């Protein structure tokens, strides 16, 4: 009986059109202690353009996965030496393979309990044996495509100049990119699990966490705080937080993008101090003084000007001499350049 593909499968598989090179073909590690099943799975997947590596037990599969860096692992559940559930746990615990999707397959029909055990072990999906070819290919195509997208996202995060991290609702870091590791001068592996207070200081961390503990917002939450870097020098950080909710709509975690704005903050402070010095000098000058733009509109007047003409700065901002006085008076003031 000829197999007929679904429209969904056609769309997914069209993204892998008999790959142009060996390196571009999605890599699959298949594990099963039954040689006939292993051969069947290999044949089906290779015909669809996948590069397939096989193993007969979990121990060999673990080393194989570390070596070939697969796009997906398809494993039987019941196997000698190491079963599929333990293999899945090991893969998800190791930083080299934690993001690789795992599809567990089993001929033991225990219904929902089997799929629940698989998902509890960290599997990304579950397949009952004997499998239907179409179901297998749809699941593999979906998981490999998701893996490709997530890997591209992780690469963007790691290459970003901004600090990007996630944390739980208790304020513990669950992931952080290379920019964050450079700023705090600690490996990412050490930062994961650290409290926010360890990185940002007690006061800043408390305020940041309180923003997300008050409830869910559909808008990004922003903050600016002074923190200390690894050398103890003050740095100004600006953060944007997005709440991630669980299936019940409750806050589950927080994603944050943080930028070091120290240079900008220092420049703004220097400009403000310069403006304050200028204002103090002009306000204590005995002469009236003003500044106009190219269209003759007031942008500044000093205190002597306010006293002499009985006006306030807010009264004249954006206005011309003719807006404030009659034409005759304005002409005289214009002649005297007031």
Image (cartoon, helix red, strand yellow):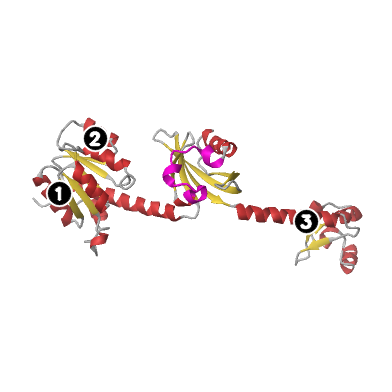
Mark 1, residue position? 41
Please indicate whether residue 109 sits to the left or right of residue 68 in the image.
left
Q: Position of residue 286 (x, y in %)?
A: 91, 58
**Residue drawn where x is 49% and y is 45% of the image:** 256
Q: Residues within 10 Å of mark 3 (few under 14, many from 20)?
A: some
Expressed as whole percent of the image width and height from the top left, the position of residue 22 reads: 23, 62
Q: Answer whether residue 212 is visible to the viewer in this image.
A: yes
Residue 7 in view of the camera: no
In the image, what residue occupies the spot 16% across and 36% down? 78
Q: Is residue 312 above or below residue 92?
A: below
Q: Quadrant of residue 201?
A: top right
Q: Is residue 192 magenta?
A: yes
- Give the distance between the C-alpha atoms of the residues marked 2 and 3, in whole angstroms: 70 Å
Q: Which residues are magenta?
A: 180-200
* Residue at the image position 35 percent from the left and 52 percent from the top: 151
- Spatial separation of the CA atoms under disc 1 and disc 2: 20 Å
Depth check, mark 1 against mark 3: the one in front is: 1
Pointer 3 residue: 317
Viewer-nearest residue: 199 or 42: 199
For numbered disc 2, what is the local secondary structure?
helix
> Is disc 1 surrounded by few (<14), some (14 to 19) or many (20+) residues within 10 Å?
many
Q: Give the labeled residue for mark 2.
A: 115
Of callouts 2 and 3, the N-terminal one: 2
How far is mark 1 from mark 3, CA to CA? 77 Å
- Label 1 or label 3, whichever comes before in sequence order: 1
Q: Mark number for residue 277?
A: none
Nearest to the observer: residue 12 or residue 191: 191
Q: Main secondary structure of the magenta part?
A: helix
> Residue 191: horizontal and vertical position, in percent?
45, 43
């Amino acid at each position: 009986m000829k197999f007929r593909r679904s429209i969904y499968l056609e769309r997914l598989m069209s993204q892998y059109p008999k790959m142009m090179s060996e390196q571009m073909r999605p890599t699959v590690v298949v594990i099963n202690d039954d040689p006939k099943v292993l051969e069947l799975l290999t044949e089906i997947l290779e015909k669809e353009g996948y590069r397939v590596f096989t193993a007969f037990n979990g121990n060999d599969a673990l080393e194989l996965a570390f070596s070939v860096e697969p796009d997906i692992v398809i494993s039987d559940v019941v196997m000698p030496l190491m079963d599929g559930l333990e293999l899945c746990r090991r893969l998800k615990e190791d930083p080299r393979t934690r993001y690789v999707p795992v599809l567990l397959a089993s001929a033991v029909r225990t219904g929902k309990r089997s799929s629940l055990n698989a998902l509890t072990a960290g599997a990304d999906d579950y397949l009952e044996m004997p499998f239907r070819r179409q179901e297998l290919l749809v699941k593999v195509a979906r998981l490999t495509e998701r893996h490709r997208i997530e890997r591209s996202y992780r690469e963007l995060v790691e290459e970003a100049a901004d600090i990007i991290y996630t944390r739980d609702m208790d304020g513990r870091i669950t992931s952080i990119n290379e920019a964050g590791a450079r700023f705090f001068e600690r490996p990412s592996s050490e930062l994961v699990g650290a409290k926010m207070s360890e990185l940002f200081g007690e006061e800043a961390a408390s305020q940041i966490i309180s923003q997300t503990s008050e409830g869910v917002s559909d808008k990004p939450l922003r903050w600016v705080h002074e923190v200390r870097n690894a050398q103890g020098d003050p740095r100004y950080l600006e953060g944007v937080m997005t709440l991630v909710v669980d299936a019940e709509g409750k806050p589950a975690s927080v994603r944050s993008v943080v930028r070091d704005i120290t240079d900008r903050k220092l420049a703004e402070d220097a400009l403000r101090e310069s403006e304050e010095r200028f204002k103090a000098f002009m306000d204590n000058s005995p002469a009236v003084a003003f500044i106009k733009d190219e269209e003759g509109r007031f942008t500044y007047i000093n205190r002597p000007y306010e006293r002499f003409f009985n006006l306030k700065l807010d009264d004249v901002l954006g206005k011309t001499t003719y807006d404030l006085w009659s034409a005759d008076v304005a002409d005289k003031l214009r002649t005297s350049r007031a």
